[in-house]
Amino acid sequence: MLREIKKYFRLKRKVKKFLKEYDAFELTKIYSKDSYIKFRSLFVETKGEINDKISLQISNKIGKYSNVDSSNGILGSSVNLSEKIKKLQQDGYVIFEESLSENVIESILNYAQNTPVSYLDVTTENQDFSSKKVLFDEKNIVSPRYQFTGNEIIKCPALQELVFDTSLLYFAQEYLGCKPILDLVAFWWSAPFEGKGKSAAAQMYHFDLDRIKFMKFFFYITDVDTNTGPHCYVKGSHTKLPKQIDRDGRFEDDEIEKVFGTANLIEICGKKGSIMAVDTRGFHKGKDLLEGKRLLFQIQFTNSLFGQQYDVIDYQLIDSKYKDILSKYNHTYNNIS
């Protein structure tokens, strides 16, 4: 009992100290690598409660936009989105009935097939990408993952239009409970590679901890079935970290299955153009491909820029038709503007 009491007060002191560091970040927008490591450790030790505490503080401080018009966006009006937001809060993922049009899919696919891209170096355990850029060629696969940079992504008009879609902004705001910040866009090919590089390619179960609170939109640009790399998600795992697996790292399938049960391990298959929203604080992975290829686009919104460092998108690459959105929702697009 005495040991547990000491452990409780030791954790309480660590939380208090970190909250002071986070308050300093709010003033200066500067934090150390050590602070981020502490944050990840406290997420595990508090089973996620530290994130919830800070998120409430952020929501109370920042508030929401009062004028986000979602009706012209790809997801439709705010009236239609309320049930989807509730489902994301409950399950940690939601699949939309809406999808990308054939023209948009073709435009994105054509861009990806004709733009040289870096690929994951499987000779290391890290997420290191090649300096050499190559066109993706499914007949000559050299890596399980080929990834575009933020500026390469934003050069594609169809992808840029999704980045500035106000229905996505509205949805993110309602889920995060405050004005969202666009902090990451990602776009990559996945290919079969005999299981090599599974961990670095995010093909083992894990939870993301990029930020305090965040959510992602995923867009399938190719058809995805059980053999072509579906996004796999553990339903309901985004709310609290179970004691049996309260560590930071990668997890084998059977370890996750023992804790959550097979019924909660969801494979999200879908036709090209499919759209989903996911809270990747929950356990998830991209299933390694057995055949074919997968092309996926991701947009991430967060409530705070404390956490991982990502490339800032070049403002000069933004089409002038989006400048009003940049100005109107400047808190969201501050990483660009």
Image: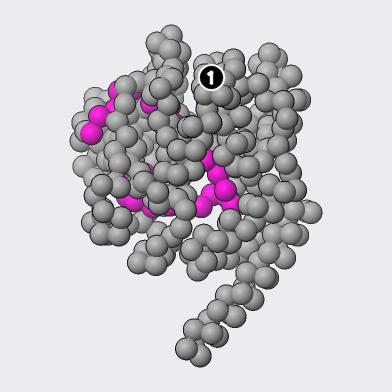
Of 93 and 216, nearer the camera is: 93
Name, please, the residue furthest toward the top. 103
Q: Quadrant of the C terminus?
A: top right
- Rendered view: 143 above or below 169: below
Badge 1 amino acid: Gly
Residue 86 in the image: state x and y as whole percent: 49, 38
Do we see residue 32 in this rendering?
yes
**Quarter residue 157 falls in:** top right
* Residue found at x 40% / y 22%: 97
Q: Mostly what secondary structure, the magenta segment?
A: loop
Per the image, is 217 magenta? yes
The colour scheme applied to this rendered structure is one colour
Residue position marked by numbered label 1 in the rendering: 76
Of 206 and 291, nearer the camera is: 206
Residue 234 in the image: state x and y as whole percent: 35, 47
- Rendered view: 294 above or below 30: above
- Classed neighbour count for the residue bearing mark 1: other residues with Cα under 10 Å, few (<14), some (14–19), many (≥20): some
Query: In this picture, which residue range is highlighted in magenta?
Result: 199-226
Name, please, the residue furthest toward the bottom. 2
* Residue found at x 32% / y 50%: 204
**Quarter residue 32 falls in:** bottom right
* Residue found at x 66% / y 66%: 18
Total residue callouts: 1
Residue 249 in the image: state x and y as whole percent: 40, 59
Whether residue 312 sits left or right of residue 109 in the image: it is: right
Residue 330 in the image: state x and y as whole percent: 74, 31
Per the image, is 93 magenta? no
- Rendered view: 15 above or below 304: below
Whether residue 316 sits left or right of residue 139 in the image: it is: right
Of 118 and 168, nearer the camera is: 168
Do we see residue 316 in this rendering?
no
